[in-house]
Amino acid sequence: MFSTFKRILMAGGATCALVATLATSAMAGPSYSFTVRTANQGGAQFDAANPATGFNAAGAITATFNYNGPLSFNVGPPQNNNNAGDLNSAFFGANAGAISSYSGAGSLPLPSGANFSTLASFLGSSGSAANYQYGSLYTIGLGVLSAGTRLTITHDDGVSVYQGGVRIGSTTAGPTSAITESVVLSNTGATTLYFGRQNGAPSVLTVAVPEPASIALFGAGLLGLAALRGRRSGKQAGNAAA
């Protein structure tokens, strides 16, 4: 009896552990639309919502492009006090090659000194600096997602999720330290994520969903546990009848 119970626990534990591992994988395409808006504006008045506040200062510059890499970005510390840190090239890292159809224009004076005229100059620009000297707002089109989809979002400095102009969930949209929050979509439709990048490095954003394979595996694990339990109950009933 103990051996059977132990097998049930081990099977369930292994299944749940594997499901958890799979579920943490970042979303990865096939393609996402990005709009990046950078503005020279001081003060902690940024809000990653729609309409956004703080990022709409006069003279802000904008870049748009498609991106077919994983939605996982992390510029580590130390915090930068000028435009030599928190570079877009570091934010996209090895996945900068996943950017296509780039379109941008304009440049900003110091403190950011950003230049969006070409992809190379965009990657060479800084997204934010300490003390809110300047910052960037990312508008990311996630495509059409199904009702019931759970988005697990790790971020710093604010995110919000929208469908059809309606905000979904209650994520932290303003300045914060790195946190993980979840949003469950109430409808099927085009889904947009807003992300605030501000106050210098670190800059963190990862968007993950449970993968179909993990859900199927979880279901198979539950069926296996039920079968083992049924077998045990049947054996006990047989012994009682004897």
Image (cartoon, grey):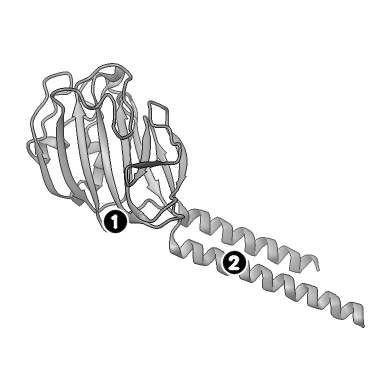
Mark 1 nearby-residue class (10 Å; few <14, some 14–19, many ≥20): few
What secondary structure is found at the residue carrying circle 2? Answer: helix
Residue at 33% of width from left, 19% of height from top? 44
The answer to whether residue 124 of the structure is visible from this angle is no
Residue at 58% of width from left, 57% of height from top? 16
Which percent across, then down, holds residue 143? 29, 54
Quadrant in the picture for the N terminus: bottom right
Q: CA distance from mark 1 to mark 2?
A: 28 Å
How many marks do you count on the picture? Answer: 2
Residue at 11% of width from left, 20% of height from top? 109
Which percent across, then down, holds residue 90? 24, 37
The answer to whether residue 182 of the structure is visible from this angle is yes
Which percent across, then down, holds residue 14? 59, 60
Q: Name the side, left or right, on which 82 lies relative to 194.
A: left
Residue 221 numbered tag: 2
- Residue marked by disc 1: 29
Q: Amino acid at mark 2?
A: Gly
Q: Name the side, left or right, on which 224 lies relative to 126.
A: right
Residue 116 numbered tag: none
